[in-house]
Image (cartoon, rainbow, N blue to C red):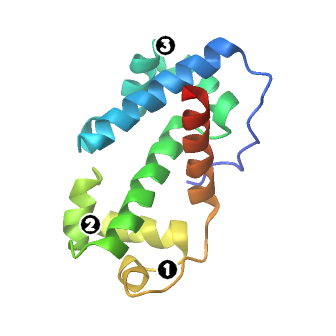
Amino acid sequence: MTEPASKPPSWTVSANAHRAVRRALDYVAQMTAAGRWLEINPDAMAAAAGYGRGHFNDLFRGVTGISPGRYLQGLRFEEARQLLRSTDLTQRAICRRIGYQSPNKFGERFRQLYGVAAGRYRKGAEPRAELLGRQVRNCLRHQRGAAA
């Protein structure tokens, strides 16, 4: 099931919402730096922000323009893209490293998101779909800007 087209972030969202999202993004950054991808999920992000999941989803979407789940999916696949191009890790190892359970589902989802198979991407094929990557990079820019 595809998510409806995201709306651009609203810059009129409260300062408290921005701080909550920053806390969640900081938590995600700490967990990914520690290689603890399996522990990261929207519920954990909401807890790190100090909100229930439903309310946090609304805050996150209001600040970033995408849902926490979509952000995490994009973050995982952006990491996979980098690993495919910069390491000799197998696709199975990359799949495990980013917290994706099934190598087959990983391959299917990679192809859906980027319009090219992971193996072909590793060999130099360029992705044909960049929307999700742009959305994730926008969230990362928000995190860096909020921390400054």
Q: Which mark is residue 103?
A: 2
Q: Which residue is mark 1?
A: 116
**Pointer 2 local density, CA inside 10 Å: few below 14, some 14–19, many at least 20:** some
Instruction: Residue at the far front: name it.
Output: 148
Badge 2 element:
helix
Q: Relative to residue 128, is residue 14 depicted above or below?
A: above
Q: Is residue 65 left or right of residue 85?
A: right
Task: Specify the amino acid type for callout 2.
Answer: Pro
- Residue 74 pos. (x, y %): 49, 52
Q: Which residue is mark 3?
A: 51
Q: Is residue 122 left or right of residue 57?
A: left
> Residue drawn at (36%, 75%), measured in percent from left and top?
85
Between tags 1 and 2, which lies in front? 1
Which mark is first along the chain, 3 or 2? 3
Q: Is residue 17 left or right of residue 85?
A: right
- Residue 145 pos. (x, y %): 61, 34
> Residue drawn at (33%, 33%), measured in percent from left and top?
30
Which mark is first along the chain, 2 or 1? 2
> Residue drawn at (34%, 64%), measured in percent from left and top?
105
- Give 45 or 88, whichever is nearer the viewer: 88
**Pointer 3 local density, CA inside 10 Å: few below 14, some 14–19, many at least 20:** some
Which quadrant of the view contains residue 148? top right
- Residue 100 pos. (x, y %): 29, 54
Q: Which mark is residue 30?
A: none
Which quadrant of the view contains residue 132? bottom right
The Cα–Cα distance between marks 2 and 3, rounded to whole angstroms, is 33 Å
Task: Specify the amino acid type for callout 3.
Answer: Tyr
The answer to whether residue 59 is visible is: yes
